């Protein structure tokens, strides 16, 4: 598809992929900040106990949950976008164009 005519349908799907990525990024940022604030409060409360084990475990688990949730949400959005776009690019020869659109 390089060097050929403009394909406005392919350009529209590329723009839609961009907007879906932007929306996913905004949702990830919002969710990440919510989890970070709640986990910081919980870590501060657990840091008032003697020893550092409970506050370290709280902070570590909150970071792990946030990381896995955000990566999972991004991969889920990518998977559903590929499923939706595969309806138009069903031929295996068109999968190069499918990956260019994404």
Image (cartoon, rainbow, N blue to C red):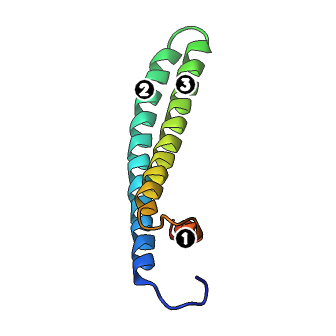
Q: Secondary structure at mark 3?
A: helix
For discs 1 and 2, the disc positioned in front in the rendered view: 1
- Look at the picture and state if 56 lies above or below 91: above
Residue 93 located left or right of residue 44? right
For discs 1 and 3, the disc positioned in front in the rendered view: 1
Q: Disc 1 marks which residue?
A: 94
Q: Nearer the viewer, residue 16 or 44?
A: 16
- Spot occupied by residue 39 in the image (x, y as percentages of width and height): 45, 28
CA gap between label 1 and label 2 equals 50 Å
Q: Residues within 10 Å of mark 3 (few under 14, many from 20)?
A: few
Residue at 43% in and 48% down: 29
Q: Residues within 10 Å of mark 2 (few under 14, many from 20)?
A: few
Q: Disc 3 marks which residue?
A: 61
Q: Kindly identify which numbered label has been placed on residue 41.
A: 2
For discs 2 and 3, the disc positioned in front in the rendered view: 3
- Spot occupied by residue 7 in the image (x, y as percentages of width and height): 45, 84
Disc with the residue nearer the chain's start (2 vs 3): 2
CA gap between label 2 and label 3 equals 14 Å
């Amino acid at each position: 598809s390089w060097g050929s005519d403009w394909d406005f349908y392919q350009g529209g799907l590329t723009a839609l992929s961009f907007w879906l990525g932007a929306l996913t990024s905004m949702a990830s940022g919002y969710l990440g900040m919510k989890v970070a604030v709640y986990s910081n409060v919980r870590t501060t409360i657990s840091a008032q106990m003697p020893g550092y084990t409970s506050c370290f475990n709280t902070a570590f688990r909150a970071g792990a949950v946030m990381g896995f949730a955000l990566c999972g949400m991004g991969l889920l959005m990518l998977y559903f976008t590929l499923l939706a776009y595969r309806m138009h690019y069903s031929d295996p020869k068109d999968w190069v164009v499918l990956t260019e659109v994404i």
